[in-house]
Amino acid sequence: MRFDDGEQRMRMAHRSVKAAMLATTLATTLAVSACGVTYISPTVQSQTEGLDVRVIAITAETALLANRQPYAPRSLPGYFREVAGTGGGLRGSGALPEAPVFPDAGAPQNLELRVPPPVVSGPYLIGVGDVIRLATRGQTDPLDPVQGASTTQDLRQEYTVRDDGAVAVPEIGAIQIAGTTIDVAEERIFQRMIESGINPTFSVEVSGFNSQRVSIGGAVGSATILPLGLTATTLNEGLTRAGGVAASDPQYAAIRLYRDGTLYQIPLETYLARDDLQRLRLVSGDSVFVDTTYDLDRALSYYESQISIIALRRSDRAQALGELQSEIGLRSAALSELRGNFQARTALGAEARDYVYLAGEVSNQARWPLPYDQQSSLADVLYDNGGFSTATGNPAQIYILRASTNPAEFGAVTAWHLDARNAANLTLAARIQLRPHDIIFIEEQPITRWNRAFQQFFPTLINTAAAAIN
């Protein structure tokens, strides 16, 4: 099909009009885009609707200035610092030993001096397990061929005090002597010999001391069970017989003495400086422990072993321990319930918290709760869940926006500016502390701004051109 010259000229004119319209549309779209109508990027500027914005570069000095604004972090409730074992004691046979006091390895503390009361001296009392020696005079030869007289010699026999407190002497029988002095024991044996028609010429002495003992353990040369004899045994003698104290640093060491349900403590430095403490008399049942290792479990296990011995002699000890365990269990359950309720209230937003806010080019724009009982820094937020988007964020434009609390400044904003193009400046992020209601803002990269503007502009350009052609 052929067109005449007039139709061809009309078609060419129509195409020229469409091309002019397309060019006009493209120029208009580019002009609009260049004016920033299609995309507005948030930035930190020195003025905003009459509100002053002070931009201060973060340096080592200005970080100290920013941290001067007072802030006390919120504290967790007191029941988060409590333990179920505090409070309460054992019924009946006395309390458990107190937890050994041990110093901090970095800074030694002053150990409390708790001296046991003085012990009244008294004669030795014979007890179960002691061995007594009975010496009598016996006739062995009726006539000595040299001197013409009968000869005699001493007969020595040993008897152990039975668990019923008696000794069994042949031809005399059982005699109760447990809990008596040697003089009383002699008097009872003398009376029994008279009653039995036996010559009462004899003497009594204790040859084996087994009923009265003290235990010495811990940092000593050799842990030992030390029997007590007729003469008083002092603390210094007991430690010497156990091989001495093996303490490399006396300022950290303590001598702990457990007696009749009570724990006494003598710092080793004080013990070495005072003669009266070295002459403290030990009594039967004492447990001495030299603690130099700060090992609480070791000291407690030692005292618990001593308590177990007492428990065998007291029928209600097991029941008392059960009551204490029940009390600790109830208290532990109560603490767990309180802590659980607090965590649930926090999750539901019912507990007051301090927050900072993340905006701009961060991985997750959100509010970030400040921690309990400690300060938080800019680095904590940048490298936590909020994060710093290195793909789109501008490391040269990291800000902490903080509104003034001074009414005279009408809410002026201070923008603490961190330029992290040099990665060494990130160390400053760990120095500057955050305050409630701070806003952490990161501007976008220039290429990111252009890319986002183009993403909005390009579809509009295509649609406008297509409409103009049609």
Image (spheres, rainbow, N blue to C red):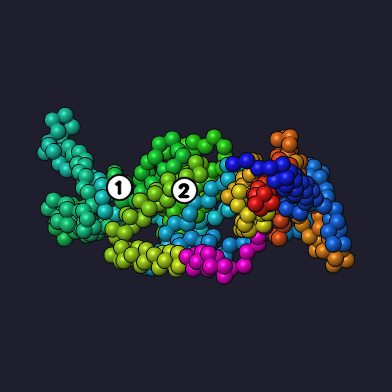
Examine the rendered structure and indicate whether residue 105 appears above or below residue 37.
Answer: above
- For the residue pair 129 and 196, the one nearer the viewer reads as 129
The secondary element bearing badge 2 is classed as helix
The answer to whether residue 414 is seen in the rendering is yes
Q: Residue 370 in the image: state x and y as whole percent.
A: 64, 57
Q: Earlier in the sequence, mark 2 or mark 1?
A: 1
- For the residue pair 379 and 301, the one nearer the viewer reads as 379
| Amino acid marked by disc 1 | Asn
Mark 1: few, some, or many residues within 10 Å (few <14, many ≥20)? some
Locate residue 145: give its quadrant: top left
Q: If the image is split into quadrants, where does the N terminus sit?
A: top right
The answer to whether residue 15 is seen in the rendering is no
Q: Residue at x 21, y 58 (%)?
A: 164
- Magenta range is 339-356
Is 346 covered by the magenta stretch?
A: yes
Q: Which mark is residue 321?
A: none
Q: Which mark is residue 296?
A: 2
Q: Residue at x 23, y 52 (%)?
A: 161
Image-based side of 58 in relation to 113, left or right: right
Q: Residue at x 39, y 49 (%)?
A: 301
The secondary element bearing badge 1 is classed as loop
Q: Residue at x 17, y 57 (%)?
A: 174
Image-based side of 312 in relation to 289, left or right: left
Examine the rendered structure and indicate whether residue 293 appears above or below residue 456.
Answer: above
**Residue tagged by mark 1?**
210
